[in-house]
Image: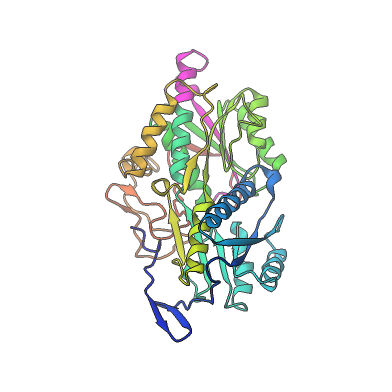
């Protein structure tokens, strides 16, 4: 069980006040059946059809789930917030507008959120996909992520099966089994994802290799498209991505190669290219956090769940272009991941500079050591998101070529 996933809360009732065990004092919560105001700050909007779109879908799904249980949510949603002082301003605005909980959806939001949180102790601030709030000294700050690397691995299996089909059809040779990957930045969150994707592909197609290019931005539609086109020009037969927009999918289709996506089903914009996507279902966390707040409780400061809790899911398989047998294969893989039968970063399945990985500290998402005592390699696997929700796998494994490094 993850060290920081969920802390048990023992409620002690006193006259007119409720306290959670430990350092967190519960803020006054609305009565059941009343309305709670919640903020959601997004780096983009629904038009990206990717990252922020996925959060907004989670928002809608959580609203419906909570309404069915008699909890009404009034959302204050702010779009196209920068990873700069506009984020600080947006957090202040949401707090001043009466939000009791404020979810920040982008990695770069956290420093600005933390500036505000100390001035609003009765408001809970959540930094999604980050790692500082869980370990700071503010009781009203939280981190949340999910085991998206599990979904990446499954998407990689689907990609590997497609490559096998291309080899069997004589369209490429085994040495031509090359995947291209558009990454935002070259730190652990992205590295963890594309490594898991590669290992999924390799599990069914042993000759596969990967080329990764970084665009230095979470959301730059043009740069993402250009990167995908360049990878296709270099012989990559399938493109995947850790970036916010659908342009890698449309660029892959234009180049006549295949694609697997992130955050949303991209078959609508690239039906001849996009095989499947993986995404975090943020409604799971939104629902849990808001329900706990309404009950006068608190979730732990660091939350992380995976496929076994439906926090990481796959979009519908594009059977029109997927290789035969893909659906049965990925269903089995998903079941095995959920049951713990597959360890995504099984150290027997990859090497680093020709050697088996036997030692690695857990690191934060910038690649810095989180703690010297957190040995991440044990029981034959690197245990991702075990010591903290945010990914810390930052190893450059053999078989993956980094074409550049945009930190």
Look at the image and give the residue range highlighted in magenta: 161-187
Q: Nearer the viewer, residue 393 or 129?
A: 129
Q: Which residue is at a point 58% across and 73% down the rendered structure image?
A: 123
Q: Nearer the viewer, residue 246 or 371?
A: 246
Residue 353 spot, x, y in % from top left: 40, 42
Res 173 visible = no
Q: In the picture provided, is 319 more to the left or to the right than 358?
A: right
Q: Is residue 162 magenta?
A: yes
Residue 251 spot, x, y in % from top left: 67, 31
Q: Measured along the vertical axis of the image, is residue 327 above or below residue 62?
A: above
Q: Which residue is at a point 36% across and 38% down the rendered structure image?
A: 335
Q: Measured along the vertical axis of the image, is residue 269 above or below residue 118?
A: above
Q: Quadrant of residue 297?
A: bottom left
Q: Which residue is at a point 60% across and 66% down the rendered structure image?
A: 35
| Residue at the limit of the structure toward the bottom, as seen here | 15
Q: In the picture provided, is 104 more to the left or to the right than 89?
A: left
Q: Nearer the viewer, residue 229 or 219?
A: 219
Res 113 visible = yes
Q: Nearer the viewer, residue 120 or 381?
A: 120
| Residue at the limit of the structure toward the top, as seen here | 170
Q: Is residue 222 magenta?
A: no
Q: Measured along the vertical axis of the image, is residue 380 above or below residue 118?
A: above
Q: Quadrant of the N terminus?
A: bottom left
Q: Which residue is at a point 51% across and 51% down the rendered structure image?
A: 189
Residue 182 spot, x, y in % from top left: 59, 39
Q: In the picture provided, is 314 more to the left or to the right than 361?
A: right
| Residue at the limit of the structure toward the left, as seen here | 379
Q: Measured along the vertical axis of the image, is residue 137 above or below residue 354?
A: below
């Amino acid at each position: 069980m993850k060290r920081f996933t969920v802390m048990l809360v023992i409620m002690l009732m006193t006259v007119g006040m409720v306290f959670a065990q430990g350092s967190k004092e519960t803020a006054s919560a609305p009565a059941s059946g009343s309305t709670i105001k919640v903020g959601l700050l997004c780096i983009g909007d629904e038009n990206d059809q990717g990252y922020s779109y996925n959060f907004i879908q989670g928002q809608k799904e959580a609203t419906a789930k909570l309404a069915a249980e008699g909890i009404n949510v009034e959302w204050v949603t702010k779009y196209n917030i920068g990873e700069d002082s506009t984020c600080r301003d947006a957090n202040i605005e949401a707090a001043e507008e009466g939000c009791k909980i404020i979810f920040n959806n982008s990695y770069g939001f956290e420093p600005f959120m933390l500036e505000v949180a100390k001035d609003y102790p009765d408001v809970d601030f959540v930094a999604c996909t980050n790692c500082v709030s869980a370990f700071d000294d503010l009781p009203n700050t939280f981190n949340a992520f999910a085991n998206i690397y599990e979904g990446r691995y499954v998407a990689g299996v689907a990609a590997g099966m497609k490559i096998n089909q291309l080899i069997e059809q004589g369209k490429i040779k085994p040495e031509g089994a090359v995947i291209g990957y558009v990454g935002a930045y070259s730190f652990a969150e992205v590295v963890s994802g594309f490594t898991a994707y590669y290992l999924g592909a390799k599990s069914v197609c042993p000759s596969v290799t990967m080329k990764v290019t970084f665009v230095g931005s979470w959301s730059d539609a043009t740069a993402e498209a250009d990167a995908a086109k360049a990878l296709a020009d270099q012989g990559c037969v399938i493109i995947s991505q850790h970036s916010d927009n659908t342009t890698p999918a449309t660029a892959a289709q234009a180049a006549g190669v295949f694609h697997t996506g992130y955050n949303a089903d991209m078959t609508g914009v690239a039906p001849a290219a996009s095989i499947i996507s993986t995404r975090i279902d943020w409604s799971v966390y939104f629902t849990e956090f808001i329900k706990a707040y309404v009950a006068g409780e608190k979730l732990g400061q660091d939350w992380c769940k995976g496929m076994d809790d439906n926090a990481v899911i796959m979009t519908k398989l594009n059977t029109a272009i997927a290789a035969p047998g893909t659906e049965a294969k990925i269903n089995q893989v998903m079941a095995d991941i959920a049951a713990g039968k597959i360890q995504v970063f099984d150290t027997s399945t990859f090497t680093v500079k020709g050697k088996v990985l036997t030692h690695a500290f857990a690191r934060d998402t910038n690649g810095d050591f989180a703690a010297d005592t957190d040995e991440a390699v044990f029981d034959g696997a690197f245990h991702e998101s075990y010591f903290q929700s945010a990914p810390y796998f930052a190893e450059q494994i053999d078989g993956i070529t980094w074409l550049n490094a945009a930190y």
